[in-house]
Image (cartoon, rainbow, N blue to C red):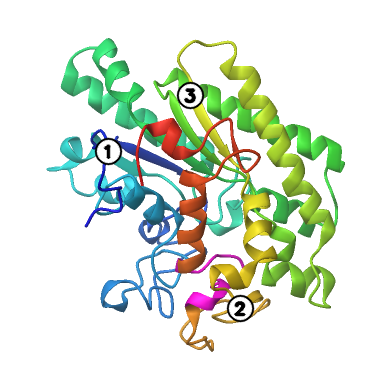
Amino acid sequence: MSPRHAGAPSPPPPAVYIFGDSTLDVGTNNFIPESAARADFYFNGIDFPYSKPTGRFSNGLNTADQIVRLLGLKKSPPPFLYLVNDPSNFQKNILQGANFASGGSGVLRDTGKAKRVIPLEEQIQHFSTIRSNITNMTGSEEATDKILSKAFILISIGSNDMFEYLLNLSKPMSLAEFNATLISTYEYHIKTLYELGARTFGILTVPPIGCTPFARAVFTGNNSCFEPAQAMAVQFYFDVGSSLEQFSSTVQDMKYSVGNTFLMTRVLTGDMLAFGLKNIAAACCGNGTYGCNQTASFCSNRDEYLFWDQFHPTQRASELVALTLFGAAEPIMVPMNFSQLLGVNI
């Protein structure tokens, strides 16, 4: 049965174009042989169908999968790099969506550069390629605009920019300068997507990255959350919200929903037993300083963990986040939730 509510029918699922980092990556980096940010190996995917490691940084489905399921799609749009390797079906598939998200990437061009990932700027260039191909099919820019205006643009990015800034001992700029650069670059990317025809945006901000197993182990060493990282995540939420509110006021046809993933995670962890969670600090696979791989130890009660590995949520935690994105009200979802934004019932 579809995850949609059995009552009033919802419109057909929109095309979904997904941008961001490992939160939403469904295998993009598998197609970059030199990438050092990959998850196409065990124990990743242990709860995915056939226990298959797919490149998702998860024990099973990730947040992108959970969101599109609630839209009524049976599976996530595949990575753009997969689609370009299937030219016979490329044009048919791109009308249904594509995933550009690349684990390790950031808002800023140089974030993740050493790991050979695809920054947001380049992800948007790939979207521009899709736009050009759609125009080749339709024969007019106006027809392409009409198609893309109905699409859903999903974005989750920013954590890696913050981690790289915090880990850089020779800071190239002050924290205030970094925050200003981060949000101005983010705003530029949103405007570029708008110019390419995007009109409906679902935004996930940065979760409490200071409470990840990595931050607890590397920055504090005493299993407590690292408050400077927490403060950066909170600031980013307010900056993104302000930026989108201002930009949307200058155009007539833009809709958006911002998910305060920092606050929603704090709600989940603050009442963790009610959500079936029993461990909100440790990694299920590996630990704060040792990533998840074939040699790592991993937990058997994965649905009771918030974190799958050093950074990423478990399949269960991703499901809880997706349900919150579609069902919560302000101040977690501003100015509306995903159900209201997209006119779907779950």
| Residue type beneath disc 2 | Lys
Q: In percent of the image, x 52 and y 86: which residue is there? A: 299
Question: Where residue 234 appears, x then y in whole percent?
Answer: 75, 45
Magenta residue check for 312:
yes
Q: Which mark is residue 255?
A: 3
For the residues labelled 1 and 3, the Cα–Cα distance comes to 17 Å
Q: In percent of the image, x 73 and y 33: which residue is there? A: 181
The reply to whether residue 35 is visible in this rendering is no
The residue that label 2 is drawn on is 278
* Front residue of 344 and 13: 344
Q: Which mark is residue 37?
A: none
**In screen coordinates, is 117 left or right of 141?**
right
Name which quarter of the figure residue 137 lies in: top left
Question: Where residue 84 appears, x then y in whole percent?
Answer: 26, 44
| Residue type beneath disc 3 | Lys
Q: Earlier in the sequence, mark 1 or mark 3?
A: 1
For the residues labelled 1 and 2, the Cα–Cα distance comes to 35 Å
Neighbours of disc 3 within 10 Å: few (<14), some (14-19), many (20+): some
Q: In percent of the image, x 27 and y 54: which residue is there? A: 75
Magenta residue check for 165:
no
Judging from the image, what secondary structure is the residue with disc 3 in?
strand
- Which contiguous range is marked in magenta? 303-315
Question: Where residue 9 appears, x then y in whole percent?
Answer: 23, 37
The reply to whether residue 229 is visible in this rendering is yes
Name which quarter of the figure residue 216 lies in: bottom right
The residue that label 1 is drawn on is 13
Q: Residue furthest left?
A: 88
Q: Is residue 198 above or below residue 234?
A: above
Q: In percent of the image, x 76 and y 41: which residue is there? A: 235
